[in-house]
Image (cartoon, rainbow, N blue to C red):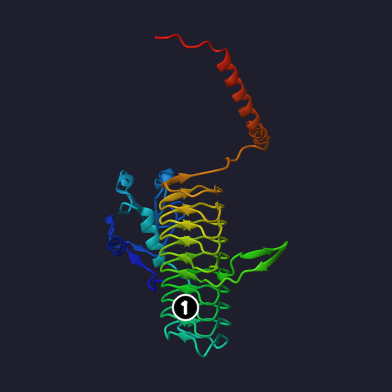
């Protein structure tokens, strides 16, 4: 979070590496959409469908691609990727409170834990035996870090998240409220109809710059570790089962479920509601559209989908009936093909 609240366009242009058109001294104290932004705010145009809003915006300046700036007479910062620039500018105006370094009087911190002096431990947090907390890390109210876990530098663990024993978080990991790291994997052996629990003795290892959403659960490994590699972003209410490995810079949207021992490659995208079966191998640079059910390994990068798009209930019911008839239709087609083959006269010799 920046402590500075007002920026000139010349300062923003220098920071972003953008070409400035307009008044370099114009002051900006916030960022908003084109329709809402006022004269002291910065707008952005990242999607061509909102081009019409540019004509009517009151924004003090706009982040634009050079090609989109033709005919626009207001202040503009020109660059190739306005959305990325918006992301960087928004951080300048982020007012998320940051607590002062130190351990709150109500926190419970083990005498054997090692908490860096620059870290902040919030009210009623629990830091158990032999835990390591790195420099600049913030652990908010009600967080529980169980025994022997390690948290790197400049992490932020939001209120009421839990990190189970022996887990490892790298540097700059963001863990939102209600997230659970290192819960037991779903491992049971069947004994004549009764389930006997299998001890889950692996860990969860999270590498640097990972962002994990609220109420997301990542299970610890049964024997080997569950591993989340660098730069992965995970939305809210995602479940990642034991022994899963997620490759670097993969993005996982809300309500995704990934079953045990599956390996997801780097730079993949899993849209909302995707389900991935267990023990699969997904190569790098694969995209799954929303609600896709992944039941087999994928070795070729690209976009994959399953299911059907929404339609009216009446149409959907008709489609469902036809789908149930496909097997019978295929059988009848084979019978017709066989009949045609019997009655069709042989081809004339050339």
The residue sitting at 60% across, 20% down in the picture is 336
Residue 317 lies, in percent from the top left, at 68, 35
Residue 22 lies, in percent from the top left, at 28, 55
Residue 268 lies, in percent from the top left, at 44, 53
- Dividing the picture into quarters, in which one does residue 85 lie? bottom left
Q: Residues within 10 Å of mark 1 (few under 14, many from 20)?
A: many
Image quadrant containing the N terminus: bottom left
Residue 202 at least partly seen: yes
In the image, residue 89 sits, relative to residue 203, either above or below, namely: above
Q: Left or right? Give the position of 82 relative to 161.
A: left
Q: Nearer the viewer, residue 30 or 290?
A: 290
Q: Nearer the viewer, residue 312 or 193?
A: 193
Residue 245 lies, in percent from the top left, at 47, 62
The residue sitting at 39% across, 74% down in the picture is 3
**In terms of secondary structure, where does tag 1 sit?**
strand
In the image, residue 226 sits, relative to residue 97, either above or below, namely: above
Q: Nearer the viewer, residue 61 or 227?
A: 227
Residue designated by label 1: 150
Q: Left or right? Give the position of 159 relative to 115.
A: right
Residue 60 at least partly seen: no
Return the residue found at the far right.
Answer: 193
Q: Left or right? Give the position of 54 relative to 214.
A: left
The residue sitting at 52% across, 64% down in the picture is 243
């Amino acid at each position: 979070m920046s402590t500075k609240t007002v920026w000139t366009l010349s300062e923003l242009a220098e920071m972003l590496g953008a070409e400035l058109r307009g008044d370099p001294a114009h002051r900006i104290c916030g960022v908003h959409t084109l329709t809402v932004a006022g004269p002291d705010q910065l707008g952005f145009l990242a999607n061509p469908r909102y081009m019409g809003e540019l004509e009517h915006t009151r924004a003090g300046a706009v982040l634009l691609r050079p090609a989109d700036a033709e005919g626009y007479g207001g202040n503009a910062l020109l660059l190739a990727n306005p959305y990325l620039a918006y992301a960087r500018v928004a951080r300048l105006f982020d007012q998320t409170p940051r607590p002062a370094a130190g351990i709150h009087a109500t926190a419970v911190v083990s005498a054997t834990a090692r908490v860096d002096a620059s870290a902040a431990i919030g009210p009623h947090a629990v830091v158990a035996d032999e835990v390591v907390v790195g420099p600049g890390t913030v652990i908010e109210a009600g967080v529980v870090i169980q025994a022997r876990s390690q948290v790197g530098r400049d992490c932020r663990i939001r209120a009421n998240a839990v990190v189970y024993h022996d887990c490892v978080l790298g540097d700059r990991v963001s863990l939102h409220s209600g997230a659970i790291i290192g819960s037991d994997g779903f491992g049971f052996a069947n004994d004549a109809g009764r389930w006997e629990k299998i001890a889950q003795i692996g860990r969860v290892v999270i590498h640097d710059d990972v962002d994990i959403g609220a109420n997301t659960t990542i299970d610890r490994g049964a024997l080997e570790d569950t591993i989340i590699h660098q730069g992965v972003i995970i939305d809210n209410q995602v479940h990642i089962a034991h022994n899963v490995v997620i490759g670097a810079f993969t993005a996982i949207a809300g309500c995704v479920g990934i079953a045990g021992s599956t390996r997801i490659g780097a730079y993949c995208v899993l849209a909302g509601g995707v389900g991935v079966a267990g023990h699969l191998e997904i190569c790098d640079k694969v995209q799954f559209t929303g609600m896709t059910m992944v039941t087999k390994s994928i070795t070729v990068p690209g976009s994959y989908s399953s299911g059907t798009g929404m339609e009216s209930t009446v149409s959907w019911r008709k489609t469902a009936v036809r789908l149930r008839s496909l097997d019978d239709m295929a059988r009848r087609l084979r019978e017709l093909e066989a009949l045609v083959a019997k009655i069709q006269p042989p081809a004339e010799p050339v």
